Structure formats: structure tokens, C-alpha cells
Amino acid sequence: MAFNYHRELQAWVVPLLLVGFFAYLMSHGFLSVFEVTADAMFLCFAIDMETNDGTAEKPYFVDRELLTFVCQTNKLTEGQNHRSLRPLQDNEDGTELQPMV
């Protein structure tokens, strides 16, 4: 008897909007915690780089993986900055403008 009950939901928009709103609130809460954690981690990294110099007297306290990640990212952005300062050669970036026919 319970499986044969087929009631049509007339107002389907309101429950759908409520579920969407609460799903947004939950995801926003989780991502806010993630964002604050990442900001705190990079702030601690910046303070560690500012106060310590990596010598035996003042070693870095940052994780080695994070340090190598930031160094690699800095090298990539420096390469992009150098590339944007000098004029482009023919077909250097792999794109070529074609006339529209």
C-alpha cells in the first residue's frame, strides 16, 4: 500500500529553491574554512621568510614541499614576466591571427 502511493507534487519550485539555498550555504561554509586555512598558511609562510634566513642560527620552519612549490611558482611567474616585457617573435606563442572570410 505504501509503494502504490503516487501523489503529484504541485509546488516543486519551493522545495527545489530551499534545497539549492541550503546546499549553497553548506558549500560556502566549507569553502570559507578552506580559504581561511590557506590564507593562514601563506601568512605564516611569509612571516617565516621575513624573520628567518635559512642559516643554522635562524632556520626556516616552513615545510620543504611548500618551500619548493613556492620557489617553482616564482620561477614560472618570473619567466612569464620576462616573456611579457620583450617583443614577441613570429608565431612564438603558437597562435596566428587569420582573416575572417
Image (cartoon, helix red, strand yellow):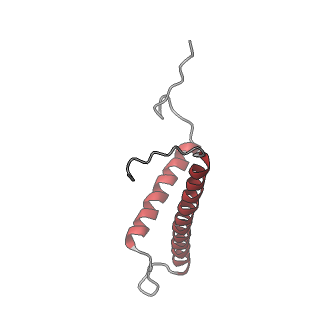
| Residue 2 point in image, percent of width and height | 39, 53
- Which quarter of the figure has residue 100? top right
| Residue 99 point in image, percent of width and height | 56, 16
Q: Which residue is drawn at 54% across and 45% down?
A: 9
Q: Which residue is drawn at 50% across and 80% down?
A: 52
Q: Residue at x 60, y 46 (%)?
A: 11
- Which quarter of the figure has residue 94? top left
From the viewer's side, name the closer residue of 89 and 62. Answer: 62
Point out the residue furthest to the bottom here: 57
Q: Residue at x 44, y 76 (%)?
A: 62
Point out the residue furthest to the top here: 101
Point out the residue furthest to the front here: 1
| Residue 45 point in image, percent of width and height | 51, 73
| Vertical placement of residue 33 versus 13, above or below | below
In the shown orientation, is residue 3 left or right of residue 50?
left
From the viewer's side, name the closer residue of 85 and 13. Answer: 13
From the viewer's side, name the closer residue of 70 and 3. Answer: 3
- Which quarter of the figure has residue 19? bottom right
Looking at the rendered image, the quarter that the C terminus falls into is top right
| Residue 35 point in image, percent of width and height | 55, 65
User: Total label count?
Assistant: 0
